Image: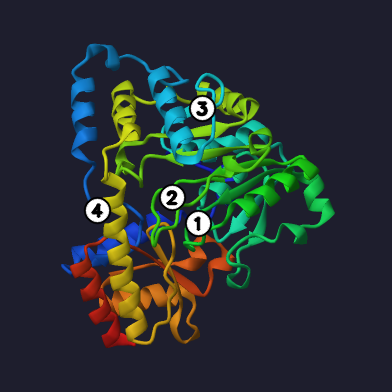
Amino acid sequence: MGIKIDLSERLKKLPPYLFVEIDSQKKRALDEGRDIIDLGVGDPDTPTPDFIMKAMAKAIKDPSTHVYPSNKGLREFREGVAVWYRERFGVSLDPETEILPLIGSKEGIAHMPLAFINPGDVALIPNPAYPPYRNGTIFAGGEPYDMPLKAENNFLPDLGSIDDTTLNRARILFLNYPNNPTGAVCDRRFYQEVTAFAIKNNIIVLSDAAYTELSYDGYMPPSFLEAEGAKAVGVEFHSLSKTYNMTGWRIGMACGNKDIISALAKVKSNIDSGIFNAVQHAGIAALKGKKGYMDGINKMYQERRDVLIDGLNSIGWKVEKPKATFYVWARNLDGQDSISMARLLLEKADIVATPGVGFGEHGEGYVRMALTVPKKRMKEAIKRIKRII
């Protein structure tokens, strides 16, 4: 006779993790032998570039990379991040105190609330949003406060609508631009307003910038750290996952305020042993880049975006083209709820799309489609959708 297994209250509070549910549904369809077009989880379908894999192959043969890695990461990787930020955004960072390598930006995002949230404290969280903002807050014993992202406000949070009682309890504010799931973007003026808001209310800003390098039509997304005074109030999370097709490699970084970075490092030092050193050498090669690499990646996604959205618009499903990310945020047809819309696409067209409500209640009314299949499959998806609407 076994013991009774009772989950913690924190675990019970977590909503079902969206992408696990989608994978389960997709697996069932594939097991039935159906030809599935997967526009669900945002995982690049092209391989990690050769110049990165070659750096990894060389590093992995070096026995010095096989030991426990430092929590602070390799100095060379941190210096590479500093150079990249300076060249890309014009932002200066101290590699010693203002940069912390992460085992993918997700783990840093999820762990950050442990450094600053006490039970009863509030985290200001966009809704819809990437689930770890909310889940990390719950794990830390905090209370998520939803900031609705609405089309009429260009999917930006209305900071002025937050009541004083909530502001007095708020410790951290999550941002994400270019935005997942909506594909929305912001400008430097918005980041300047956020910085002023954070200073006035003594709130830490956590900016998730994983998609800044995936942009179209000549648009170049800014960094939160470009705002005057931003480094005094917050940090920015970045990742090599989407930019360099390194999702499985698990490498990212947090950059900005040295005291916030130090606090996250203290949490991490009690949980993990840092990134495998050979992966960091691959990351150094990625950050140094290869001339024309990102131009090619963005050209590919822009072409896919245009095929998908032009096709949807041609059959009466009106969708706007995002300037960044590889996501399309499409309003549901005929007033359907998002789960019903996603189910219709899967059951009648063998297409996996993500229901917007999975990103929060304010994602209801939409589905998200990822541009992570070739143009030929995009065209096939349009044909299938045309048959069911």
In the image, which disc is placed on residue 99? 3
- Which amino acid is tagged 3? Ile
**Mark-to-mark CA distance, 3 and 1:** 23 Å
Q: Which residue is mark 1?
A: 179
Q: How many marks?
A: 4
Q: Where residue 148 appears, x then y in whole percent?
A: 64, 63
Name the quarter where the N terminus is drawn: top left
| Pair 4/3: label in front | 3
Q: Residues within 10 Å of mark 4 (few under 14, many from 20)?
A: few
- Kind of residue at badge 1: Asn
The chosen color scheme is rainbow
Which badge, 1 or 4, comes first in the chain's sequence? Answer: 4
Whether the residues at callouts 2 and 4 have beta carbons within 8 Å, the answer is no
| Mark 2: secondary structure | loop
Mark toward the start of the polypeptide (2 vs 4): 4
Determine whether 208 is above or below 358 in the image.
above
Looking at the image, residue 15 lies above or below residue 321: above
* Residue in the image at 56% along x and 21% along y: 97
In this figure, which residue is indicated by the disc labeled 2?
211
Quick one: which residue is furthest to the left in this view?
33
